[in-house]
Amino acid sequence: MVQDARVTYRRRNPYNTRTNYFKKVRTPGNRLVIQYLKKLHLKHRSLPRCAEMGTPLRGVKPNRGNYKNKRLSLLQKKRKAVSRAYGGNLCHSALRLRIIRAFLSEETRIASKVRKAQKKAKILRRQNKSKKKKRNKKGGAAAAKKRDESKKKAAAKAKSTKKDTKQGGKKTRGKRGAKKAN
């Protein structure tokens, strides 16, 4: 004999609405009956999900009770929270990625600051060197005197070396390569 798969509603609402939510169940007496389900299909019955990845959050119980006036009892508040930053809102992997991203962005920001400071220092050093060279070339009256004195000293040294060579006369070499003056 073929089993009949037809069932009828057991309550007074005869329409297929969101609240008339059921599943077919076989009883121990081998009858097929309807078992009415609670509002599992609505949002407040589902597990909280990660805001970024959409995965169900671990360690958080769904808020099943007291949903009509949307208040949480003390027990439910204790169950709900995960004790870390973004607990109950982000999963651990999304939070880890956020922390790494924040750390890396901070590092790059600091590195760019250091690079800019180094560039500025390099430019300042170049400018200082060029200023010193210009000062040495132009200089003031004191610098001009020093330059003149150094030129005179150099000229005097050159003259004295020329005189020494003229006074020496002929120079000959002996057997062993020693220098002898006539």
Image (cartoon, rainbow, N blue to C red):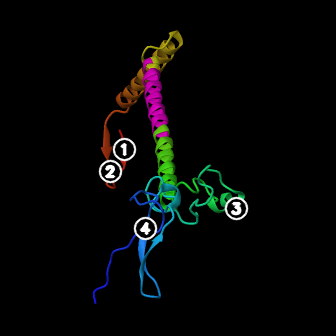
Question: Residue at left 46%, top 88%?
Answer: 29
Q: Quadrant of the C terminus?
A: top left
> How many marks overall?
4
Which amino acid, mark 2?
Answer: Gly
Above or below, 114 against 55 in this view is above
- Estimate the spatial distance between the alpha carbons at disc 2 and disc 4, rounded to whole Å: 139 Å
Q: Circles 2 and 4: CB distance less than 8 Å?
A: no
Question: Residue at left 50%, top 47%?
Answer: 107
Mark 3 crowdedness (10 Å alpha carbons): few <14, some 14-19, many ≥20: few
Residue stretch rendered in magenta on the structure? 114-134
Which amino acid, mark 1?
Answer: Lys
- Estimate the spatial distance between the alpha carbons at disc 4 and disc 1, rounded to whole Å: 139 Å
Q: Which mark is residue 75?
A: 3
Question: Residue at left 51%, top 17%?
Answer: 146
Place of residue 166 in the rendered image (x, y in percent of width and height, measured from the top left): 35, 28
N-terminal of the two: label 4 or label 1? 4
N-terminal of the two: label 3 or label 2? 3
Q: Which mark is residue 174?
A: 2
- Estimate the spatial distance between the alpha carbons at disc 1 and disc 2, rounded to whole Å: 7 Å
Label 2: state its secondary structure: loop
The residue pinned by badge 4 equals 9
Q: Circles 1 and 2: CB distance less than 8 Å?
A: yes
